[in-house]
């Protein structure tokens, strides 16, 4: 057995050197476990764990902020992974009975990689974790760009949500040389000010529909125009990028945000503004 201290819950976990029964209530951590080659050790997940799709075959324990305690007990996990933010209270509650390791909700791209290494350390696969981290760093180096675009990002999370300074999304855009129009707001996320979007007049709009819902680009454009955004440059000049569904791409803060979401964003923004595709 080994002792692992979790800063977020202020608890010391006593867990096996290499845990064999793992519950992950964070889609990002579940994806990380699979990418570390530990998918067979995962015995329970949340209802939103779809990265990879094989995770859907595991026992589903609840949503982001709730879980079936009796079902969790029956799984007898060696360790339970959660994140902060929307799961902070869940982490504190579960840590009274289970070995809970909570990871900080990432505010930067570097934080995503930091989470990968921490999961690997807890799981006793340090070398594999650092190899995955190296892959992610190399991918980021390919994405550094000077897009020089003002971008508005909106995700339907049961309502319109955009992102501020403390978001990995804002940080990812900055790495590619793009500016999030709400990127200086001192927050992780916020309800967007539609009038401010009109005033900022972004060069491009990135929109992600609600998870599990099929939404066409035509439907998104119709919705945006109903807000009175006909004059927004991104709409007038055809630079509205709608993420492919039905699963989250941009709202997901696992390793695939770096490996899949950022390349997709770069590709879409480059097509929208090809003269800005100059590598630094």
Image (cartoon, grey):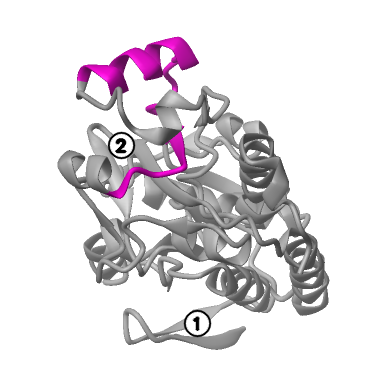
**In the displayed structure, does residue 150 sit left or right of residue 192?**
right
Q: Nearer the viewer, residue 214 or 120?
A: 214
Is-magenta flag for residue 211? yes
Q: Position of residue 79 (x, y in %)?
A: 50, 66
Q: Position of residue 113 (x, y in %)?
A: 63, 70
* Span shown in magenta: 200-226
Establish if 2 lies above or below 72. Answer: below
Going from N to C along the chain, the mark reached first, 2 or 1, is: 1
Q: Nearer the viewer, residue 189 or 8?
A: 189
Q: Residue at x 70, y 61 (%)?
A: 145
Identify the residue position indicated by label 1 in the image: 14
Q: CA distance from mark 2 to mark 1?
A: 36 Å
Q: Position of residue 198 (x, y in %)?
A: 24, 40
Residue 16: quarter of image: bottom right
Is-magenta flag for residue 195? no
Query: Do the CB atoms of the residues marked 2 and 1 lie less than 8 Å apart?
Result: no
Identify the residue position indicated by label 2 in the image: 157
**In the displayed structure, does residue 34 sit left or right of residue 68?**
right
Looking at the image, can residue 41 be seen? Answer: no
In the picture, the quarter occupied by the C terminus is: bottom right
Q: Residues within 10 Å of mark 1 (few under 14, many from 20)?
A: some
Tell me the element at label 2. Answer: loop
Looking at the image, can residue 16 be seen? Answer: yes
Q: Residue at x 73, y 51 (%)?
A: 277
**In the displayed structure, does residue 182 sit left or right of residue 279?**
left
Q: Residues within 10 Å of mark 2 (few under 14, many from 20)?
A: some
Tell me the element at label 1. Answer: strand
The mark closer to the camera, 2 or 1, is 2
Residue 46: quarter of image: top left
């Amino acid at each position: 057995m080994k002792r692992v201290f979790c800063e977020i819950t202020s608890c010391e976990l006593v867990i096996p050197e290499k845990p064999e029964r793992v519950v992950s209530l964070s889609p990002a951590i579940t994806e990380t476990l699979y990418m570390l080659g530990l998918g067979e050790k995962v015995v329970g997940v949340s209802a939103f764990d779809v990265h990879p799709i094989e995770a859907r075959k595991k026992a589903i324990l609840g949503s982001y902020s709730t879980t079936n305690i009796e079902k969790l007990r029956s799984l007898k996990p060696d360790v339970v992974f959660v994140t902060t933010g929307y799961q902070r209270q869940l982490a504190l509650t579960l840590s009274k009975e289970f070995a809970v390791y909570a990871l900080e909700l990432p505010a930067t791209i570097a934080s995503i990689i930091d989470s990968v290494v921490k999961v690997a350390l807890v799981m006793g696969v340090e070398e594999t974790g650092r190899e995955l981290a190296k892959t992610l760093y190399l991918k980021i180096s390919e994405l550094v760009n000077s897009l020089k675009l003002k971008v508005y990002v909106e995700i339907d999370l049961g309502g319109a949500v955009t992102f501020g300074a403390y978001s990995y999304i804002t940080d990812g855009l900055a790495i590619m040389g793009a500016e999030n129009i709400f990127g200086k707001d001192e927050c992780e996320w916020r309800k967007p000010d539609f009038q401010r979007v009109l005033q900022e007049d972004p060069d491009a709009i990135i929109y992600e529909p609600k998870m599990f819902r099929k939404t066409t680009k035509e439907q998104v454009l119709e919705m945006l125009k109903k807000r009175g955004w006909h004059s927004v440059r991104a709409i007038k000049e055809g630079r509205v990028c709608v993420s492919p569904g039905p699963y989250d791409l941009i709202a997901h803060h696992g390793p695939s945000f770096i490996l899949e979401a950022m390349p997709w964003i770069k590709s879409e923004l480059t097509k929208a503004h090809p003269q800005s595709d100059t590598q630094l």
